Amino acid sequence: MATSPLSLNDCRARDAADPLRSLRDLFTIPKELIYLDGNSLGVMPKAATARAAEVVAQEWGQGLIRSWNTAGWVNLPHKLGNQVARLIGAGDGEVVVTDTTSINLYKALSAALSITKEDAPQRRVVVSERNNFPTDLYIAQSLCNQHGYTLKLVEPEEVSASINADLAVLMLTHVNYRTGAMHDMAAVTAAVHKAGGLMVWDLAHSAGAVPVGLRDADADFAVGCSYKYLNGGPGAPAFVWVHPRHTDRCWQPLSGWFGHSAPFAFTPDYQPAGGITRYLCGTQPVVSLSLLECGLDCFAAAEKLGGMGALRTKSLALTDLYIQLVEERCQGFGLGLATPRNHAQRGSQVCLTREHDAGGDLGSGAFAIVQALIARGVIGDFRAGDGGIHKDILRFGFTPLYVGYEDVWNAVEHLRQVLETEEWKKPEFNQKHAVT
Amino acid sequence: MATSPLSLNDCRARDAADPLRSLRDLFTIPKELIYLDGNSLGVMPKAATARAAEVVAQEWGQGLIRSWNTAGWVNLPHKLGNQVARLIGAGDGEVVVTDTTSINLYKALSAALSITKEDAPQRRVVVSERNNFPTDLYIAQSLCNQHGYTLKLVEPEEVSASINADLAVLMLTHVNYRTGAMHDMAAVTAAVHKAGGLMVWDLAHSAGAVPVGLRDADADFAVGCSYKYLNGGPGAPAFVWVHPRHTDRCWQPLSGWFGHSAPFAFTPDYQPAGGITRYLCGTQPVVSLSLLECGLDCFAAAEKLGGMGALRTKSLALTDLYIQLVEERCQGFGLGLATPRNHAQRGSQVCLTREHDAGGDLGSGAFAIVQALIARGVIGDFRAGDGGIHKDILRFGFTPLYVGYEDVWNAVEHLRQVLETEEWKKPEFNQKHAVT
C-alpha cells in the first residue's frame, strides 16, 4: 500500500466507473445512511414492498387456501432453493429454503453423524472453531451430548491438525462472523475426506458475498442464511444443501409432513421423500419466504453484469479501499486489523480490533465507537471479545450489490472524526442495548 | 332436531341478532365466497395490509438492523406468546410464538421424554391417535426411534385403556383434524397424571376456536398453530407452552442462540435461558411473525364482546345449524356425520362422511363434491379415508369471528344443488391437485 493518499474524488471516480453501479438502484438505501451491516441484515430490495402487498392482499386475502396451488406456495422452498443453488455452486433440485440456519444445521449435522456412525463408528469427535457463530456451537453441543460425541473447539490455525482418525465431522463457517476470515473450502474439504471424515459448511457469511463451489469442493452438507447478503428480509428462512450421495441414506430427525414422500396423503407412517425434499419439516412462513425472491432476483440482475465473479471483484476492491483508508487516515488510535489482507482468505467484511484497555476505563472503546458511528448514520456492529486472544471487534460489511466507493470514504471519515474528537467517550455511547 | 324447517330468513334474523356480528368487519372476506376453511388457513384481518407495508417499508426498509431494538422484533415471540396465552388458559410469560408446530412438537415431546426417562425410566410407550394429524405422528416416530420408545397408535375410544403403567407420554390433538371430535382436556390429563405419565396437547384446531384451559387442566406441554383460527397468515409461526414445573428441568434439543440465557454475549457454551425462552431456537421470520399480531388483535376486540365464551356459543350455534340444515335438506345422498353431536365433544368444524362406494366408480365422491363446492365459491376441504374404518371426509370449518348464519344456509344450499344435479360427477372435479 505504497500508493499516494486517496481522495474523495478518487472514490467518486471509482463509483462512476463501477460496472455494477446500476444494481444499487434496485435497493432502498435510507438517506443519510452508510449501511455497512448487510452482513447482519441486508437492505430492502425496492420490489419487496409491492411483493409484500401482493402476497398479503391478493394471495392470502383473496386467494386464501387456494393459493397453496394457484400462487405456488407449496413449491417456494424448492423454487427459491434453485435460485440459491446457483449462487453456491450446487445443482438444480439440491437446495431447499426453509426454517432457520440453526434448525437446518441440526438436520444436517444429525444426518452427518448418523452416516458417520454407520460408516466409521470409531470416529467420535466433532471439530469446530471456538469463535464459530455461537448458535452453530450450541446445536453441535446438543447433538454431541445426545449421541455421545466429543465437541472439540479449536482456533483457526489448529483446524488442520484436528483433521485426524478420530474426526467424525468438521463443521466450519466458511467466512468467520467475527473476523471475516475465509477458509479454503476445497482444500479443507479434501483434507477431511482424505482423513475419512465428513464436512459441514455454514455459508451464512458467504452466500451472495463470495463465490462458493459446493459441488466443485465435493462438500457433504451446507446450511446458510438468507437475510444477510441475500437481502431476504428480517429472519427470512434459511437454506440447506446435502450432497445427493447422502440425501437418501438416512432420515433427518425433524421428520415433519413437508418432508414426507406424499404429504397430502395423510398416512400415519413417515416415508421420507427422496432427495433434499426430506429436509423440509413443517409449514413455512409464506410471506417472509416470498420476500426472499425479491432479494434473489437482484442476483439474477447481477448475473447479466458478470455475476458472482464481478461482485467478488468489487467486494475485494471495497474492502481493500476501506483497509487502505483506515490505515492512511486513522493512525494512532489503537486500531488493528482482524481481517486477512490476503484476498483468498477474506470474505466481504472488514473487522477492526481495539486492544482491551485501549479505551482506559471504557474498555477497548470498540462498542462506544460503533455506537457513535451509528449515531452519525454509519451502521456497522460490535462483537465483544473474551478478554483473551479474541479481541473486541468493530465489524463492517461491504455488500457489493449496493455499497459504493464514496460510502467507504465517508465511513472512514466519520471513523476518523469519532476517534479524533473522542466523541465516542460520551456516556450515551457506552450504554449497551439488547441487540447490537 | 324436531323443530320446523328453517328458512333463509331465519338465518338472516340470526345474523341480525348476533352480538358478535361486528367482528366480521375486521376481516376481508372475498366477495362471492363462503369460506369454511378457516381451520386450514384463516382469512386476512383488514389490518394486515397496512401492517405488512409498515414492517416491510419502514421497519426493514428504513430501520434496518436497528429495528431489532427500535421496532421490538426481538420481543415478538414473547409479546405474541402472551396474547396467545390468554386464549389457551396459560400464564403470562409461559408461551412463545416461534418456528412451526412440527418443530415445537419435537422440542416439547423431546423434553417430555427426557423428563419421563429420569422420573420413570421403565415407561417406554408413547401413545397417540392413529388419525392424529400426520406430522405429529411423524415427529413422534422420529423421537421414539431415536430414544428407544414404542409409539402406539390407537383409536379415540381406545385412549383410556392405553393410559397405564407403560405410558411415558400421551400425545393428542385436542380437536381432531379429520372429525372435529374434541377430547376432555382436564379429564384426560388427570387420568394420565394419575397413571404417572405426561400429557402433550396439540392445540392446532383449538386455539381461538374453543375455550382452552391448560393451567386449569394442569397439562404438561402444548403446541399449536397460528394460521388457522388465529388468522396469522399463511405459515405464520406456531406456539409452544410448557408448564413452569418442567421448563427448567432439561434442555430442549434445538438449542439455538435465541434460547440462550445471554444470546448477544456470543459465548461458545450453551447456557439455556430460564422458563419458556429456552424453547426458542433461531432467528424468526419477522414479517410473517408481525402479521400474526393483526389476527390476535381481533381476539382483543372479541374480548369486549364476551371473548372465547361468546365465540364458543356462536361456534356451536353455527355447527348445530349446519348439521340441522344438512339433515333437513340433503337427505338421501349418502352423507353421514363424523363430528359428535354432543357439544362437549365438538370443536368448531363439521365433518361429513360419504361411504367409500357411494359414488360408484368415482369412489365416495367426497373429493369431487368438495371440488364442485369450491367452484361455486364454497370453500371447504377433503380428507381422504383409508378405505377401512376411516371414511372419506368433507370438512367444513366455522370460524365464529367471521362466519355468519346466512353463510351456513347458503353453504348447505350449494351442497344440496351439487348433490341433486350430480354436478360433482363432472370430470374436472375428479382430478386431484397437489394440495387440497
Image (cartoon, coloured by chain):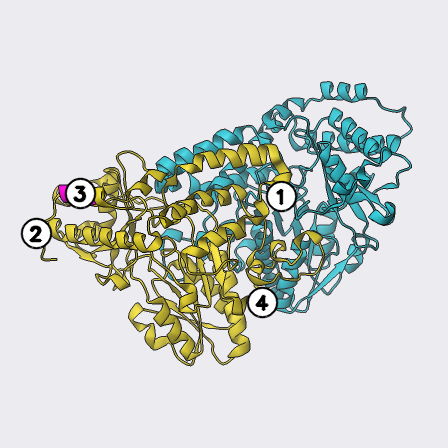
Chain colours: A cyan, B yellow
Q: Position of residue A102 (x, y in %)?
A: 60, 53
Callout 3, which amino acid? Ala
Callout 4, which amino acid? Asp
Determine whether label 3 and label 2 are within 8 Å by CB: no
Chief SS of the magenta region:
helix
Q: Which residue is mark 3?
A: B13
Q: Which quadrant of the figure has residue A184?
A: top right
Determine whether label 3 and label 1 are within 8 Å by CB: no
Q: Nearer the viewer, mark 3 or mark 2?
A: 3
Report if residue B101 lies within the magenta region: no
CA separation in Å, label 3 and label 1: 50 Å
Locate residue A376 relative to residue A69 in the image: left or right.
right
- Could you tell me which chain the residue with mark 4 belongs to? B
- Could you tell me which chain the residue with mark 3 belongs to? B
Q: On residue B109, which mark appears? A: none
Residue in front for this viewpoint, A357 or A79: A357
Residue span colored magenta? B9-14
Residue B182 to residue B359: above or below: below
Residue in front for this viewpoint, B265 or B352: B265
Dot 4 or dot 1: first in sequence order is 1
Q: Which residue is mark 1?
A: B69
